[in-house]
Image: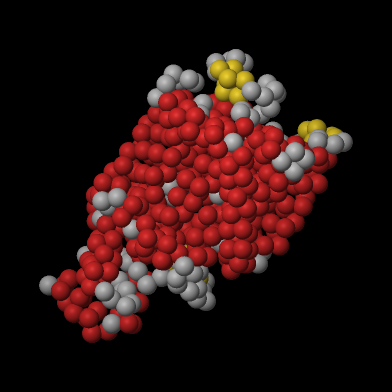
Amino acid sequence: MQELVNTINGIIWSPALIYLCLGAGLFFTVLTRGVQVRHFTEMWRLLLSGKSSEKGLSSFQSLSVSLSGRVGTGNIAGVATAIGFGGPGAVFWMWVVAFFGAATAYIESTNAQIYKEEDDGFYRGGPAYYIEKAMGQKWYAWIFAIATILACGLMLPMVQSNGIGEAITMVFGQGDTIETALGTLSMVKVYTATGIVLLLGFIIFGGVKRIANFTQVVVPFMALAYILVSLVIIGLSIDKLPGVFMMIINDAFSPMAGVGAAIGWGVKRGVYSNEAGQGTGPHAAAAAEVEHPAQQGLVQAFSVYIDTLFVCSATAFMILITGAYNVHGAGEAFLIQNVAADVAANSPAYTQLAVESVFSGVGKPFVAIALFFFAFTTILAYYFIAENNVYYIRRTLKIPALNLGLKIMLISATFYGTVKAADLAWGMGDIGVGMMAWLNIIGIIIIFFMSKPAIKALKDYEAQQKAGVKKFSFNPKKLGIENADFWEERFAQDNPQESKESTKENEG
């Protein structure tokens, strides 16, 4: 199974996908004239404004749901993996993919807002919806929806729950073992898995609002606590920071682990962590209650900064400053070995050792707690994303049991991931991320060349900003954007006369 997973990963994560992720980010950065830089202050304003409704989430709730998907195991174990296999230079490429990825996040999230729908009393949308409406290719939308259900409902939850299981065993050890149909399992992991799935079931059976209410409290609190601890560790060795920073920059273009390895692992773990272009963020973006689609695009672009430039950088600096890492070379050789050879790179172990080296007796439990909340909220976000795609499929296949089937699949995958080995879980997760990234990035590029909806929305928003409007509005007909049914109806309700005039102009 592991060999099969590795083979599939080698195909999906070929250099072509690395270039596609970086190229798309650069492409959209140029086309939006650096939207992630120009509108940085507007991102802050939007983040703190806006209210939820019965049908939608507030901007902050949407950001929290999105961040719960972005800030997860990838920020703690994923960064360690990138350093362990790609060298310190991989961190630089994580920064690069985050900076350019913020523009990609704007494009995909604005598209999701433009083409969202109201379904079962709630806003729903995402790549499957905008691929169908903007590209006019329902078959392609179905492929994305099915791939996303498999990725977010089966593959990716295993990675998150596996990180929790590994972190807990770093604190309490493996404990007694038990023979099961799944093989020999650690009882510590079995107890951990049982606790996770019980809490997970309670929340996901409570609906989207319960997920949003949980994540908007937990995610900001844990992210802030984690960053504060990292600042203390960095501050205690501040004299080493310039050297570490230069090591990251120099290694990004040097042959340590190969320049290709640094780029490959940096981009792979960067995309896995910040999810820009992967197609997960647009689902939360579509659920937001906003005055204009571009507003949620800007908020989601900011979430990439929080994930990679703040949380991932915090992890990287802690690991590198304390020297709690190895760099794997070919075979079993090490290019750098600072810790025991049996310390797994594809786990939270490097991060736990880094914090433990400063806060003796506290570091391992703290990282385990942080990882639990990061990973658990990410699993919730994965359910939210997969559920959106189940609803998309249910528009055609009227099978109510699909939702129940998704819940059972996700809970089973979470339990399995917690108790099984890390290599298989991460391999499955990489397949899930890669599938979605290929389908979504190609989709948003084609949509751009067909109709440029996100660019038109940005220009319209900037024009209203310049005019100093007190309340923003969005008239897709006037901008030549077709099939944006939700926004057409909203504009017609708020501006009946102007809506009629826009319709006449388009017909003319």
- At a point 61% along the width and 63% down the height, the residue shown is 217
- At a point 43% along the width and 47% down the height, the residue shown is 276
Residue 62 place in picture, x, y as percent? 50, 63
Residue 482 lies, with reference to residue 407, above or below; the image says: below
> Looking at the image, which is closer to me, 61 or 114?
61
Residue projecting furthest to the bottom: 497
Residue 293 place in picture, x, y as percent? 36, 65
> Looking at the image, which is closer to me, 314 or 282?
314
Quadrant of residue 251 within the rendered picture: top left
- At a point 47% along the width and 27% down the height, the residue shown is 247
Residue 155 visible, this orientation:
no
> Looking at the image, which is closer to me, 206 or 293?
293
In the visual, does 402 lie left or right of 49?
right
The count of marks equals: 0
Position of the C terminus, as image quadrant, is bottom left
Residue 186 place in picture, x, y as percent? 81, 37
Residue 486 visible, this orientation:
yes
Residue projecting furthest to the right: 176
In the visual, does 282 lie left or right of 496?
right
Residue 480 place in picture, x, y as percent? 22, 65
In the visual, does 163 lie left or right of 330?
right
Position of the N terminus, as image quadrant, is top right
